[in-house]
Amino acid sequence: MAERFRELIEAADEARLGPLAVRSYATRGRQRDEDPCSLRSPFQRDRDRIVHSKAFRRLKHKTQVFVAPEGDHYRTRLTHTLEAVGISRSVARALRLNEDLTEAIGLGHDLGHPPFGHAGEQALDEALQARFGRRFRHNEHSLRVVDVIERDGQGLNLTHEVRDGILTHTGPAVPATLEGRIVKLVDRVAYINHDIDDAIRAGVLRTDELPSGPVDLLGSSGSQRIDSLVHDLVEESDRAGDIRQSPRMGEAMLELRTFLFANVYDARALRAETAKAMGVVRSLFTSLCDDPAGVPDLRGDDLPTRVTDHLAGMTDRFAIRRYGELHVPSAWREP
């Protein structure tokens, strides 16, 4: 079976995949040459490496929107990743694209997110600019995680296609593969709808406050809206030979996103906690820069790189605990 595995996968690709899909063994290669696996294609191997990484496990304790939530049903960075991957695979399957490549990109796209979600990313970016004139972008750091940080500085040695999809999943760059373009769009489909769900659960938002235009077009529930957006995405992409939405569906999704920024992400109910979270990141950044003795040094990197790697890798709870150790006095106890 192992001797015939590649032949079987290549035959299945030709029978199942469309002409625009990346074939399972058509990768442009890895950063370093290595022997192939006899029972996994290159993209299946990348998927497994990401799932078994420390950075992937830490996503379960990183904020999506609500900082350190006590409830059991709020999304985390990990559950967002899994939801985005599930939708992305469905789209890839319908369009006869490579599901394994799509899954690997989706699983790795947010590995570089710092604690406290986008608030933490903004705080780290501002701190880096102010002290060192550098910027922080989570997609760039996600690539650094898989290229350098994992495996004690050796990295995961992923394929070019997966690395490209991770780097370009946000921002102006266009992914090189259709599979990467699926993840880039579906990432937004997923977080817009589950962030609405979490905001309603938290009492920050009521269902009847959602803008009527997008709701009338897409549906009144998160599942209905995702279903509408996915069907539109598949139909439009199939006609275009690229990953696209129809203009009216894209505009409706953008209106929901704009509404979220105004009424949830910047809501007064979250503003105070967001400010606290940003304060934690800024304080930790300053403390680590001023006293870097405990900051790991994997490959002889400079101080801003070492501090960024260490801080961005923290979970919410680790960052809060470390902040307490540095800035909250300990109670004296009798011997």
Image (cartoon, grey):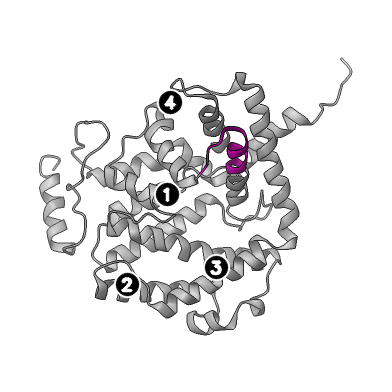
Q: Earlier in the sequence, mark 2 or mark 1?
A: 1
Residue 51, above or below 76 = above
Mark 4 or mark 3: which is in front? Answer: 3
Cα–Cα span, label 1 and label 3: 20 Å
Marks 1 and 2: in contact by CB < 8 Å?
A: no
Q: Count all numbered tags in the image, as a single digit.
A: 4
Q: If the image is split into quadrants, where does the C terminus sit?
A: top right
Name the residue type under label 1: His
Taking the spot 57% from the left edge, 43% from the top edge, the residue there is 125
Q: Tell me if 235 is positioned left or right of 264 in this view.
A: left
Residue at 60% in and 47% down:
122
Relative side of 267 to 260, left or right: right
Q: In terms of depth relative to the viewer, which is nearer, 322 or 82?
A: 322
Residue 237 is situated, as x and y percent measured from the top left of the image, at 29, 71
Q: CA distance from mark 4 to mark 3?
A: 38 Å
Q: Which residue is mark 3?
A: 257
Q: Earlier in the sequence, mark 4 or mark 3?
A: 4
Decide whether residue 275 is among the magenta residues: no
Q: Nearer the viewer, mark 3 or mark 2?
A: 3
Crowdedness near tag 4: few (<14), some (14–19) or many (≥20) residues, C-alpha within 10 Å: few
- Where residue 281 appears, as percent x and y from the top left, is 65, 39
Which amino acid, mark 4?
A: Asp
Highlighted range, magenta: 124-136
Residue 109's mark?
1
Measure the C-alpha gap from mark 4 to mark 2: 40 Å
Q: CA distance from mark 1 to mark 4?
A: 20 Å
> In the rendering, which numbered label is found on residue 234?
2
Please, what is the three-letter code of the amino acid marked with disc 3? Arg
